[in-house]
Amino acid sequence: MLTKYMTIVFDDGPLPFMCEIVDLFNEYSFKAGFAVMGARINDDTEYMLKYAIDNGFQLVGHSHSHPKLETVSREQVIKEMTKPISYVKNRIGYDMKNWARLPHLCRDESVLQICKELKLILLGHGMRCGSDWLVDATPENIIHETLDTACDGAIACMHVKEHTYQALKTILPELKKRGFELVNPDELFKIKGKTDIPIGIHIHNINEI
Ligand SMILES: [Zn+2]
C-alpha cells in the first residue's frame, strides 16, 4: 500500500485536551501542528506548548486575539499576526517562523496582501472535519466527515476540543489502517519536495501547489 501523507493543524490552543491529543498521536507515531493564540499563552498554559514541542509537534501562529482581521486596521493585522511569533520565542525559545493559520480562515484580499508582505505561509483547510469548532459538533459527524474526505497531501483544520479528541480515538487508528502517515506541516512540505512554498495564499492541499 502506497503511504499517503497529510497533516492536521489544531487551532485555538493552548486549551484543555491539547496534551491528550499529543498523547493520542504518539500512540500511532503520528505528528501534528497546533495553531496557537498569543492571548491564551500564560503561566498556567505555557506547559502545553512545551509538551507539544518536546514531543516533536509543530507550533504555528493563529493571531494574538482571534479577531476578524478584515475588520481591523492594517497595523492591527500586522500586530496580530507577528506578536505571537515573538511572544512564543521570548517565552519558551521556540521559533514558529512564518507558519500561520488565519483566524476564521480569513479570505479578505487586503488581509492576504499583508500576509504576503509578512511572508506568511498560510495553512488552509483541505478536508471537511465535521465543523468541529461548533459547540454542538458531535464526534460521530467529525469521524464521518474526516474519514470521508481524508486524502494525500491534505492540510486539515481541526480544533483543540473535547469532542474532537474523542473523535480522534476512532479517526487515528482508521487512518493508520488506510495507509496514512500524519506528520507536521513542515514535514509534509519536505516529504513532498516542496521547497518553493507560496506565501500569502491559503494552501489546502500540498499536491495543488
Ligand atoms: Zn481559530
Image: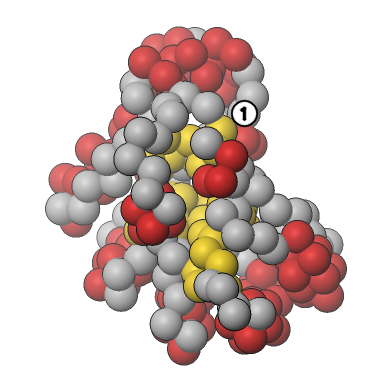
**Is 72 left or right of 117, judged from the image as shown?**
right
> Residue 98 in the image: x percent, y percent?
32, 36
Q: Residue at x 36, y 15 (%)?
A: 117
**Is 142 left or right of 7, judged from the image as shown?**
right
**Is 88 left or right of 208, judged from the image as shown?**
left
How many dots with numbers? Answer: 1
Name which quarter of the figure residue 32 lies in. bottom left
Q: Residue at x 48, y 85 (%)?
A: 28
Three-letter amino acid code at the position of disc 1: Cys
**Which residue has dot 1 on it?**
106
Looking at the image, the residue that sits furthest to the front is: 1
Q: Is residue 63 visible?
A: no
> Vertically, is 146 above or below 120?
below
Q: Is residue 69 visible?
A: yes
Q: Residue at x 66, y 70 (%)?
A: 164
Q: Nearer the viewer, residue 173 or 209?
A: 209
Q: Nearer the viewer, residue 4 or 159?
A: 4
Name which quarter of the figure residue 134 lies in. bottom right
- Ligand 1 has an atom within 8 Å of the beta carbon of the residue at disc 1: no
> Residue 193 in the image: x percent, y percent?
37, 49
Name which quarter of the figure residue 81 lies in. top left
> Vertically, is 173 above or below 56?
below
Q: Quadrant of the N terminus?
A: bottom right
> Residue 200 in the image: x percent, y percent?
47, 24
- The structure's colour scheme is secondary structure
Classify mark 1: residues with Cα within 10 Å, few (<14), some (14-19) or many (20+): some
Q: Residue at x 52, y 36 (%)?
A: 209
Label 1 sits on a secondary structure element that is loop
